[in-house]
Image (cartoon, grey):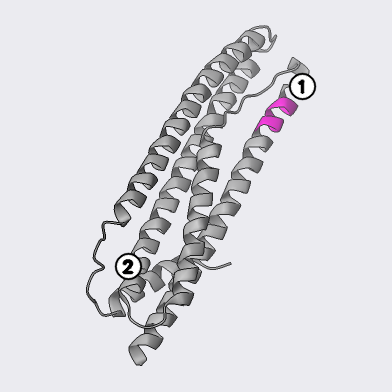
Amino acid sequence: MVNLKLALSAAVLLLTIVPTVLAQTSTSSSTPKKETLKERFETRKATLQERLDQRKENIASRTAALKSRLAKFKDQKRAQRVEKFNENLNKINENRTNAFLRFINTMSDILAKVETRVGNASGDTTAAQAAIADAKAKIAEAKIAVENQSAKDYNVNVTTEGKVKTNAKAAFDSLRQDLQATKTTLTETKQAVAKAIQTAASTLGENNGQ
């Protein structure tokens, strides 16, 4: 597994040692593409917001149902612990997915700088461009995975007071497994960005040596 710290260091090195060249000029043909990308972004943003709103409603509804069940517990201290545990499940998911999104944004920023250097370079940059395209695809895939995860809600499905511990564990295991699956996607993204950095550094180094 490629170390993130090494990847970030490579990015800094790449941006430092590669000489600055003329910036790419924008063309009129790129405008429609930018507009299309913006429209897609706005559509995805609206869809995600709808899902998040629905998630809030689901959490509120399920929390109310849980409180109703817990009110019937003989052991009310246990009931309070279960209620608190239930609240924490969705807080954990929110905190982790927010951290995941920050990570994706960092990877995206790094890749954008690498792409600029490669785009401004002379010589054959085919390998670097291919690695960058792959990293972009991984970033897009990871972002969708995180957005999907952020829209999920978790709730302890209490069957009986005697089985509440088992019910709570089932809810936590579900959250843990989902977060792990999302994290796997982020790991693949990190590896793809690191590969793009390494390929770009190699390509630009070879071109500068010509």
Element type where label 1 sits in the image: helix
Amino acid type, residue under disc 1 in the picture = Lys
Q: In this picture, is 114 found above or below 57?
A: below
Locate residue 65, reporting x and y percent: 62, 12
- In the displayed structure image, the side of residue 117 where residue 85 appears, left or right: right
| Region rendered in magenta | 165-171
Residue 198 shows in the view: no
Nearest the eye: 86 or 136? 136
Q: Name which quarter of the figure residue 99 lies in.
A: top left
Furthest residue toward bottom? 210
Residue under numbered circle 1: 163
Locate residue 20, reporting x and y percent: 24, 76
Secondary structure that dominates the magenta span: helix
Q: Name which quarter of the figure residue 64 lies in.
A: top right
Mark nearest the camera among 2 and 1 is 2
Nearest the eye: 8 or 77? 8
The crowding category of the residue bearing disc 2, from other C-alpha atoms within 10 Å (few below 14, some 14 to 19, many at least 20), is few
Q: Considering the image in quadrants, where does the N terminus appear?
A: bottom right
Residue under numbered circle 2: 116
Q: In this picture, is 106 found above or below 76?
A: below
Q: CA distance from mark 2 to mark 1?
A: 57 Å
